Amino acid sequence: MEGVEEIVIAGAGLAGLATALGLHRKGVRSVVLESSATLRASGYAFTTWTNAFRALDALGVGDKIREHHLLYERLVAFSASTGEAAAKLSLKMQGKSGPHEIRCVKRNFLLETLENELPEGTIRYSSKIVAIEEEGNVKLLHMADGSTIRANVLVGCDGVNSVVARWLGLPKPILSGRSATRGLAEYPDGHGFGPEMLQFIGQGFRSGVLPCSDTSVYWNYTWYPSPADGDAEESVDKMRQHVLARLRAAKIPAEALDVIERSEMSDVVSSPLRFRSPLALVRGSICRGGVCVAGDAFHPMTPELGQGGCAALEDGVVLARCLGEALGAGGHGSAEAALAKYAGERRWRAVRLVTAAYFVGFVQQSSNPAIKFLREKFLSGLLARVMVDMADYDCGKL
């Protein structure tokens, strides 16, 4: 054991890197411990809504992301049963904090952009925390390699299976009963899709096709797994054929199927979708002493709003602002008070997002005849509006 680190961040995902970069902008040093040997870009891409771009602008990297990703003009939700558009929503609208902007951003590009803004040596790879102890006000972080790191402040950005969240006493995330798979297709000569988000909803699944740039398209697919899926989980090829079979049985256009056929998919063929109970977020300890959580370690949610990564970026900005005000040059106050302020700002935002995401997913994928009728006649437009309204949020400046 050597000296004490002022701030240690567990996890180099979106929340961890956003927090580290925000602190760096405030003149506060931090160390990021990443369990993997490199940045993890699983998921390929994610929908980056207006609120995320407010956070990225606060961090000083928004324009670098905009340069490489398409700006959407429309959201179109199709019925998988009829093939007809159940809802069309213009995204060229004003929000409370300015015009809306929505893009599908490649995850590795964003992570690398954040990393490149950090001082060299900020991220320590192959550094996995396996246990946490207290020694007075200092946290003892026991690492997988047998070493121990001492920290005054510990920020858990270590994902849905967070060691830090467990130490805080937060309950395990709940299985939603749904799973997801996804991929990214490259079109060197251009793909021909317009600047729009395409959703296909119904028959027990939800699928999206989202252009990232003029030459790449991201897709996702969520469904309720069942024994009828057979051996789909055994390999990437079998999962691809399972998804294509489900979509071909519905009224999905050929160009959307082509995206899936030509795409690259992860070796992890699917992921069970989990979320933290809103009641656990209301009652649970988001922070205690000099320890807190952010990102998926704080508020894992189902993906229907496209807000998991966006909320992680918000967390990073708010957390860096609170800690920077306490620990930066001319700062006043304690780290514990700063973390309590962060928790107060973020708790109810997280509750709203987790609750809304679960509700939207339930309605979009329900096979109940009454819900199906309402969805195709009335609710699809309302659900699309909910997605935009949840993104109409500004986490503020650093």
Image (spheres, grey):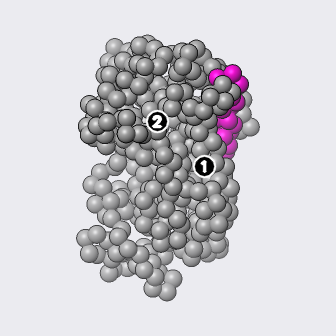
- Identify residue type, mark 2: Thr
- Percent x, y of residue 378: 71, 25
Dominant secondary structure of the residues highlighted in magenta in the image: helix
Q: Give the left or right position of residue 345, taking residue 226 as reference.
A: right
* Residue under the point 68% across and 27% down: 374
* Residue under the point 43% across and 19% down: 249
User: Around disc 1, counting alpha carbons within 10 Å, would you say few (fewer than 14), some (14 to 19), or many (20 or more)?
Assistant: many
Residue 326 higher or lower than 300, as above or below:
below
Residue 95 visible in the displayed image: yes
Q: Which image quadrant: the N terminus? A: bottom left
User: Around disc 2, counting alpha carbons within 10 Å, would you say few (fewer than 14), some (14 to 19), or many (20 or more)?
Assistant: many
* The image quarter in which residue 322 lies: bottom right
User: For mark 1, what is the residue?
Assistant: 354
Helix, strand or loop status at disc 1: helix
Residue 8 higher or lower than 264, as above or below:
below
* Residue under the point 41% across and 25% down: 246
- Magenta residues? 376-398
Residue 282 higher or lower than 305, as above or below:
below
Q: Nearer the viewer, residue 337 or 145?
A: 145
- Percent x, y of residue 290: 54, 74
Tell whether position 113 is magenta: no
